[in-house]
Amino acid sequence: MTSPGMINALVYTGVAVMCVFNYAVAILADPGRVPSTYMPDIEDSKFNIHEIKRKGGDLRYCQKCSHFKPPRAHHCRICKRCILRMDHHCVWINNCVGHANYKAFFVFVVYAVIACFYSLVLLVGGLNSDSQIDVQQRDSFRIIYVISGLLLLPLSAALSVLLGWHIYLVLQNKTTIEYHEGVRALCLAQKGGSVYKHPYDLGAHENLSSVITSNGTVILMNRRRPHWFYCFRFWVQVSSVGYAPQRHT
């Protein structure tokens, strides 16, 4: 194997290992359950308890789980429990994507996109460098290249769209559920003559800080907590007063 071939093999192996690692973490990590001790700060004991999906500020009580749930938490009918900052239930990881495993899911998609495009580059390079191989072997290799390319192109396109979508959500500090709720809230606000603004948007830089460090490198772990690879640093907190973004002054 030539030196460029060895370098490509090492780089691709590293990308693949990180992709599989984060995929495993996204599968195995608990996406974030609502603590059984969670209780909102009830100032008015006569306040009616009900679940609000389109408006914030009211007490939220899950009839299926029979307990209060903080803002941004939603009940998953597949997992049969409430998930903190639930984004969606992903069939590809057989798990919800929520507060505790969103970062692992996001990083997995990043590495998957890198691996797909790296594979395409290697395929194109392989087609240009097989001129020294005899005709029979060259035809066999090109058939493999064509089949691999036909599989990689739609996969790369689909993963790129998924990555672009989640980059947009991260920059807006939204989840997929909140995006769809925001569309409805925007329509209602326009009909009422008011302006709707996503309540958890802290600005692109602050929102992006939830996923990457200040120097722009992707956080792969959080060593400050025992379950370090399950953690995802959001500007939100679970406390007796709810689940809301932290604002720094």
Image (cartoon, helix red, strand yellow):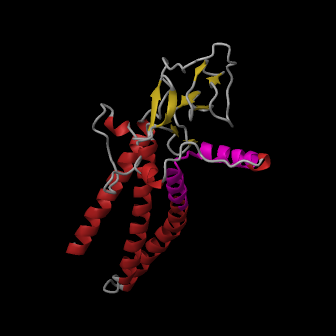
Magenta region? 161-189
Name the residue rendered at 25%, 62% in the picture: 10
Residue at the outermost front position: 249
In the rendered view, would you say 60 is above or below 115?
A: above
- Between 104 and 138, which is closer to the camera in this rendering? 104
In the rendered view, would you say 129 is above or below 49?
A: below
Residue at the outermost top position: 45
Residue at the outermost right position: 191
Name the residue rendered at 34%, 86% in the picture: 131
Q: Is residue 64 magenta?
A: no
Residue 178 is situated, as x and y percent measured from the top left of the image, at: 61, 43
Q: Quadrant of the C terminus?
A: top left
- Between 14 and 173, which is closer to the camera in this rendering? 173
Q: Is residue 2 visible?
A: no
Q: Is residue 78 visible?
A: yes
Residue 51 is situated, as x and y percent measured from the top left of the image, at: 67, 27
In the rendered view, would you say 96 is above or below 38?
A: below
- Between 96 and 232, which is closer to the camera in this rendering? 232
Q: Quadrant of the N terminus?
A: bottom left
Q: Is residue 172 magenta?
A: yes
Residue 52 appears left or right of 133: right
Residue 58 is situated, as x and y percent measured from the top left of the image, at: 64, 27
Residue 170 appears left or right of 191: left
- The mark tally for this picture is 0
Residue 155 is situated, as x and y percent measured from the top left of the image, at: 52, 62
Name the dominant secondary structure of the magenta segment: helix
Name the residue rendered at 27%, 38% in the picture: 223
